[in-house]
Amino acid sequence: MKYMLLIHTNPDAWAGMPAKEQEDLLSGYWTFTEKIKASGEFISGEPLEFPETATTVRVRDGKRGMTDGPFVETKEHLAGFYLVECADLDRALELAAEIPDAKFGGVEVRPVSNFGPS
Amino acid sequence: MDERAFEEIVRAESGRVLSALIARSHDLDLAQDAYGEALLAAWEAWPVDGVPDNPGAWLTTVARNRMLDRLRREAQRPRREFAAVRMGGIATVEVEDVEAQAARLRDDPLEDDELQLVFLCCHPALSQEAQIALTLRTVSGLTTPEIARAFLVPESTMSQRILRAKRKIARAGIPFRMPEAAELPSRLAAVLHIVYLVFTEGWNSTGTADVVRADLCAEALRLARLLHRLLPDEPEVAGLLALLLLHDARRGGRAGPHGELVPLVEQDRDRWNRAQVAEGVALIERTLPLGIVGPYQVQAAIAALHAEAPTAAATDWAQILALYDLLERLEPSPLVTLNRAVALAEVEGTEPALRILDTLVSSATLAGNHRLYATRAHLLARAGRFDEASADFARAAAASPSAAERSYLTAREAALRTALASNGT
C-alpha cells in the first residue's frame, strides 16, 4: 500500500536548537532516505521551501484568485513529504516515527487512495 | 430451541469464528455478513438436527461457504465498484485464489486469529471510542443496539462509529497480524486499557440510574479471561483479570435496596462474591512473584487487600499505602496521587492527606473533577471542617456524571447541613 508521510515541523523547536542538533536533524533525513531507498519502500520525497514562499490558488465562479501564503496558516507547517510503498499501516507508522521532525513536530500518515481504474 | 441457550453458544463462539473468517478474507464486513447468515442457518437447523458437537466449526464452515458464494458472485462485477468496497487484497482476486482462501479457512488453529482480532480492534490508529465499539461488536459479539444502549448513544451514532472504524481499517491498511515484538508491550497496554474502560463504564454507569451496569462488567471480565487464556505468560494480563475479578466481586454490596450508592467502608461484605474474591486473590498471588510487576498487578494487590479484610476497620491500610507508593512510581498520575491520599489519611491522619489534595486542586487533569471534591469533602468532614466539607460535597455532586453518585453526594451534603443547623453553626 502507498502512503504519504506529510512532515510538519515546529519552527520554535528548530529555532531553539543548537547548531549541532540542527546538523544532526538534517543528516537524520539523509540517513532515513537512504534506508528506505535500500529497502525499496521509497517512491519519492522532497523537502519543501518555507511556507512564506507558498502561493495558494483558488478558482471561484471561473475566476482564478491567488493568496500569498499556504492554504492554512498554522504555526507548525508542512515542511516536506515522502511517498512510500509498504506492507501495511503499522510499517508506515514505524517509518513515520523515524523521521527526525516527528520528535518536534508531527508526521501525518495518509494512505493513498486505491480507488479508480487499476 | 431455547433462545438463551442459543445466545450462550453464539457469545462463546463469536470471537473465534469471526477471527478465523477475517484472517482468511481480510474483510470485516464480508466475514460479519457471512457469519450472520450462518447464525440464521443454525437457528433453523439446530432445533431439528440437534446442536452439533463442535458448534464453532459448524458455524465457521457454513459462513465460509457463504463467503465463497459471495466472492464468486462479486468477482463478476466491474473492478471499480469492487475496489471501492474492499481493501487491496480481495479486489483483484481470481476464482482459484478464492479456493485457496477456502482451503485456509479449513485450517486450525483458531486461537492465534482471535488474538490478532483483538489487536486489530484495539489498534491505536483508531480512537478509543472506536476501539471499544469495534471490540464489543466483533470480539464480544454484542449487537450494535446493545452497545449503543450500554454507552447511551443513539443506535445510528454507534452504527456510524463502527462503520467508520471498519472503513479506516480497510482504507488505511491496519493489518490483521500480531504486532512486532518491539511494539507488543505498548499494543498490549492499549488492549488492556480498552478492557479496563469497558469495565469502568459498566461499574460507574455514567448514564443510567442503576449503580452498576452488570452487562458491561461481565463483558469486560469475559474479555479479560479470553486474554488471559490467549496470553497466559503476560503478568499484566493476569493482573488486569485479577483486578476486575476482585472489583466485580464487590458488586453485590455496592448498591443499596433502592439502587443507591453505598461507599466501600459501609458495604455489607456478606454480599460480596467470596468465590470470585478467592479466585482473584489466588491469581494475583501467583502472578506477583514472577517479579515483572506492573500497574494492573499493583492495583489488583490493593483490591485484594480490600476484598480480604473481613471488616472495613480491619483493612490493612499500611500495606495499601505501600502499594500506592509503588503505583505512584510505576504509573504516576493525579488520580493515583488522589487514591494514595485516601490511604495516607487512614495511616497518618487527615491533615497530611488534605495537604496532598490541596496540591491536586491546581492540577490540570483533576481541576473540577468530582472525585477530588468528594474525597476532600470526606476528609474535611472527618476533620470537623463541616462548612468546607458541605461546599465540596455540593461541588462533587454538580460535577459527577453518575446519577447514583450524585444522589449519594447530595444526600451527604444535606446530612451535613442538617448537622450544622442543629449545632447552631
Image (cartoon, coloured by chain):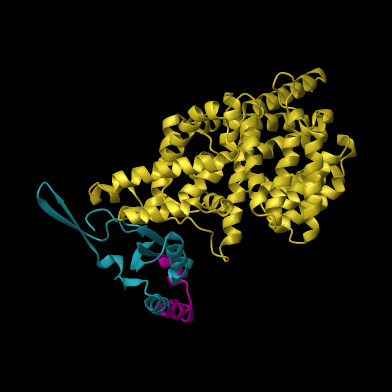
Hey, which residue is sitting farthest left in the picture? A62
Which chain is in yellow here? B
**Which residue is nearer to you in this view: A23 or B105?**
B105
- Horizontally, is B107 left or right of A80 in the view? right
- Position of B409 relative to A91 (above/below): above
Residue interval drawn in magenta: A9-31
Query: Is residue B134 something that shows in the picture?
Result: no
**Which residue is nearer to you in this view: A38 or B394?**
A38
Which chain is in cyan here? A
Residue at image coords 54%, 52%:
B113
Hey, which residue is sitting farthest front in the picture? B49
- Horizontally, is B264 left or right of A101 in the view? right
- Position of B48 relative to B70 (above/below): above
**Which residue is nearer to you in this view: B67 or B316?**
B67
- The quarter in which the N terminus of chain A is drawn is bottom left
Query: Is residue B397 something that shows in the picture?
Result: yes
- The quarter in which the C terminus of chain A is drawn is bottom left
- Position of B154 relative to A76 (above/below): above
| Rendered image quadrant of residue B150 | top right
Q: What is the x, y in percent for residue A116?
A: 23, 54
For the stretch drawn in magenta, what is the main secondary structure? Answer: helix
- Horizontally, is A47 left or right of A59 in the view? right
